[in-house]
Amino acid sequence: MKHSRRKRIKRICVAQINYNSSNIEDHVQRIKGIIDDHKNYDLIVFPELILHGHPSFEKPEGFLYRKMKVIYSSISQNIYAFIRQKGAKVIIGELKRRADKYYNLATYIEGSKIQSYTKCHVHWTENFVPGRRLRVFKSSWGKIGINICFDAAFPEVWRVLYLQGPKVIVNISAVPGQFPIEYMWLRMAGAAINNQVFVIYANRAGKAFSGNSAIFNPRGERIISAGKKEEILRVDIDLEEVERWRREEPIFKNRRPLLYREITKRPVKKR
């Protein structure tokens, strides 16, 4: 019985930190330190673009893109190797360059497996190439849904991820400080209760960002949260809560997908 409980209890770490462009080497070492301290956790989550920085906050605009060509090409591989060495399980936000195109990624590293999701809903203030499919990560303890920042505004994203079978869905973000955190928490709580999953929200801290990372249970209740400043969240979640709530409120066997076909149609343009 105790072994069964240990198997379903997962230790989660959310690293609500900011990017330090003034000293890249120190920043990478800090990330490594957090990973080393929590290497025995079942999941360590870092915010959006935490590995390389966000181009919108590099001055002059586009400076980050130029740095990618010169000094950033090896940072990802360095972090991947460190995570493998420590035997950790990590989701981290990073920037990838292919030719002159840039992609906003969430990458999951566990052992020799590296899986990445490309942000599909690119905010109108960003210049990334949008991804073309939603996906879940396969971990040693189950499937993990993933989306990035603005993706969270689209309920369809959460439902498509749910239908692929995860009990946990992660949103990594770099939400600016002027966007009300109450809205983000409402989105996360709604995604949790409507899809009966745990939702992990990992946002960046710092004066430009709103912080307030949080974790919500399958009933949409916020079980832990951070403030606006840098902070490390640590919590255990019981995956059996997902199954208990689904038995009590059996939503999905009562779905009628044929009624929902309109949702896949593009809106008619007004003349």
Image (cartoon, rainbow, N blue to C red):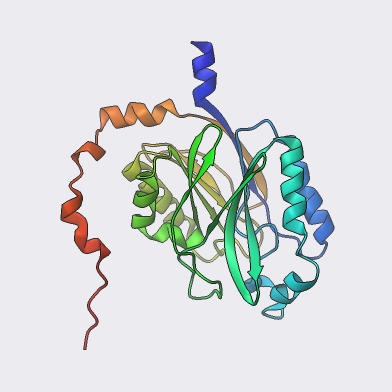
Q: In this view, does 152 lie above or below 241?
A: below
Q: Provide residue 121's location: percent of width, then percent of height.
A: 45, 66
Could you tell me how many numbered marks the image carries?
A: 0
Q: Is residue 211 above or below residue 61?
A: above
- In the image, taking residue 150 as reference, residue 73 lies left or right, namely right
**In-image side of 67 versus 179 (left or right):** right
Q: Is residue 184 left or right of residue 96?
A: left
Front residue of this view, candidates 56 and 182: 56
Seen at 73% across and 70% down, the residue is 68
Name, please, the residue furthest toward the top: 1
Q: Position of residue 70 (x, y in %)?
A: 80, 72
Q: Residue at x 72, y 40 (%)?
A: 84
Instruction: State which quadrant residue 126 falls in.
Output: bottom right
Q: In this view, does 13 lie above or below 96?
A: above
Residue 88 locus on image (x, y percent): 68, 37
Q: Using residue 266 as the reference point, say whether residue 180 is left or right of it.
A: right
